[in-house]
Amino acid sequence: MSLRLQALKNLTNSTTEVAVPFSPKITAIFGENVFTLKTAREYLSDEGYKSLITSIKGGRKIDRTVANQIANGLRAWAESKGVTHFTHWFQPLTGTTAEKHDSFFTIKSDGTSIEEFDGAALIQQEPDASSFPSGGLRATFEARGYTAWDPSSPAFIMEIGNGRTLCIPTIFVSYTGESLDYKSPLLKALVALDKAAVDVCNYFDKNITKVTPTLGWEQEYFVIDEALANARPDLVLADRTVYGAAPAKGQQLEDHYFGSIPERVYAFMRDYEAESYKLGIPLRTRHNEVAPSQFECAPIFEEVNLAVDHNTLLMDVMSRVAKRHKLKVLLHEKPFAGINGSGKHNNWSMATDTGVNLLAPGKTPKTNLMFLTFFVNTIKAVHDYSDLLRAAIASAGNDFRLGANEAPPAIISVFIGEYLSKVLSEIEGRVGEKFDEQDEAILKLDLHRSIPELLLDNTDRNRTSPFAFTGNKFEFRAVGSAANCANAMTALNTIMAETLRNFKKEVDELIDKGEKKEVALMHVIQKAIVESKAVLFEGDGYSDDWQNEAEGRQLPNVKTTPLALDAMITDKAKNLFKKNGVYTHSELEARHEIELEKYIKKVQIEARLMGDLATNHILPAAIKYQNTLITNVLGLKQIGVAEETFSAQREMLDKITEHINTIKTNVSLMVEARKVCNNMTDSREKAIAYNTEVKDKFFDEIRYHVDKLELLVDDTLWPLPKYRELLFLR
Ligand code: ADP
Ligand code: MG
């Protein structure tokens, strides 16, 4: 019996409900596996605790003796929870997380064995890093890299089965200091943003000394039966179905959205949520998404670095917990053709240490001017650097999603809602007019009123925008579901830092010329509105009209990853990232190289899968059925039945034969095309060739014929679980 039929049989017979531990209150378990400040207070000396706090706040270095104290405290806490091993936990550019477990256990010089964790082991480690992607960096500079403790993200305990490991969040850098991970440039971008934003905040409030960007991500994902998934090599190896005819019922009824959550999935959700709560991930919402078997979860927002760690951790936890439930989580951006893909909306704002959300309209004219300043600067940043945002979300997976069903297009535009559009055009309309301090334009900024209107807008048109203002934050929606949000957040916070700094320079120049502060601010805001209004779009982002209009506005619309990545290595990008202390030129070039390589490998793997599945799974089934038809036709002929009475069989036979031939021919041609690509040495050229000569030329063509066969061949012979089975059976 084929894996497919076995999986289907087991699914119908299965009654497996995994017992999920019941916790009456989330607060009872929340953060129990995290070395929170409260726990730190319990386990650390005054000196250790104080030192930890300063390094969390100011990124100050911790000296060795204090590090020893902190390490001891951490070990004592971890051991009280049954931990035997520790690991530096980091986010290499492969897109997953990495760990290397070491035990506390060690043997002293006199032969006695003890459990030990010293400051040196806490602060720095040297994982064998040679197999992580480095884009040539380590080869050029140094052979090895090291991980270094990031005190701003608390240590946590990962429970896997009965094993418990103390995880220390770290950055991963080469010996000469080049970043090799997602976290280190992000931390640098946050520092740049903090500095630039505080300087601008001080126009309005001298008490503000720190600005922390905030992030609330919304994670979309699919959940399917594990046995069915395992019967599909494409899902096993690529997280995506490369074949599959559209089911009779897709998402047209939209009956999945906000429908009740299926029981088996519900148990899985409760289980991974409980795990997440223990790790301090503040999940808040869960619901069905539009596509069948698609779901979403979202946390309460946190400061960006922590939110990024929590999202990475969550993706890991979800995948592991799903196994317990014999389910498989698909984080891929487009696991199924013809229905919605998955994104990871990045809700982003900035918070001051005085408790103000800089993207929330205030109640007084003065706070509104501060809001307007940050609001308009964000629009300007997105306008000026939309190519970098596009590059930051580029991946082989996201290429299938952007511009497809219910997904934002590859054009980066900003939605701000009707009311704020009006406010901006009024300000813009006064170009050339003078403002004065008592000006209506300043005093009458009654933006508070706009919130209810904005929320109305939210339910509707802004859904189609890749970057939408949603009342008190911007929502960057083009981010892919499998992505590490750090990439998008590094770009966004850096371009914002740069834009704010330039803004301040211009305002200061006007003030130096004797202009009143408010008037100077209004003038520069006005200028920014004029310069960036091309990026504002309130219409339907999914429409073809918008593609044309965007072209007229000269907004970039780069549809594929290899070309979108070009933006990373322009002089503009290099200067920007260098000036803000985020990436050196060589780091950017290395990252560009790594992203290209990732793209090439992904397309290469999918191309191989398509060839393998066609040759070893699809064609044998089709030929078997072809033989059945041949036998049938021959038999009918033999017993003397008239030709026209079995014309249906003949027709089916012809069609099947034609599809078989076309598939075989194209698979061979695709292999040849791959060989040509593989001989290319320049990564960019190779990535472009993989896109146009392999993916574009063959993927859809081969798939078309395979999917046709699926509709013709005897169902019991078909080897791969079908869409209706993957999407509708649980
Ligand atoms: P929805 O988009 O479903 O209407 P919300 O707008 O309430 O839901 O929130 C979506 C996400 O935005 C949540 O993760 C939430 O925590 C986050 N969010 C809310 N305010 C902020 C903020 N100031 N900064 C960053 N994220 C935020
Ligand atoms: Mg939202």
Image (tube, grey):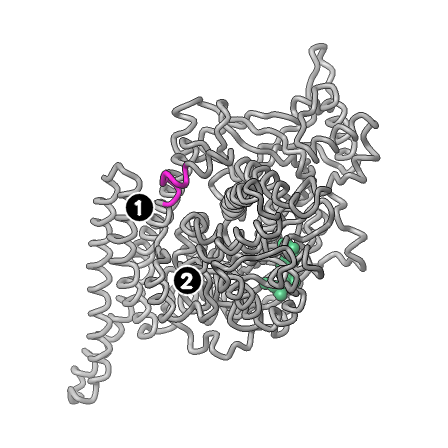
Q: Which residue is mark 2?
A: 409
Numbered label attached to residue 687? 1
In-image side of 606 versus 279 (left or right): left
Q: Earlier in the sequence, mark 2 or mark 1?
A: 2
Q: Residue 443's spot in the image, x, y percent? A: 66, 61
Q: Residue 408 occupies which quadrant of the picture?
A: bottom left
Q: In the rendered view of the protein, which quadrant contains the N terminus?
A: bottom left
Q: In the rendered view of the protein, which quadrant contains the C terminus?
A: bottom right
Query: Label 2's element?
Result: loop
In-image side of 239 versus 116 (left or right): left
- At label 2, the amino acid type is Pro
**Residue drawn where x is 69% and y is 24% of the image:** 62
Query: Label 1's element?
Result: helix
Q: How many marks?
A: 2
Residue found at the far top of this picture: 110
Q: Which residues are magenta?
A: 567-574
- At label 1, the amino acid type is Ala
Q: Main secondary structure of the magenta part?
A: helix
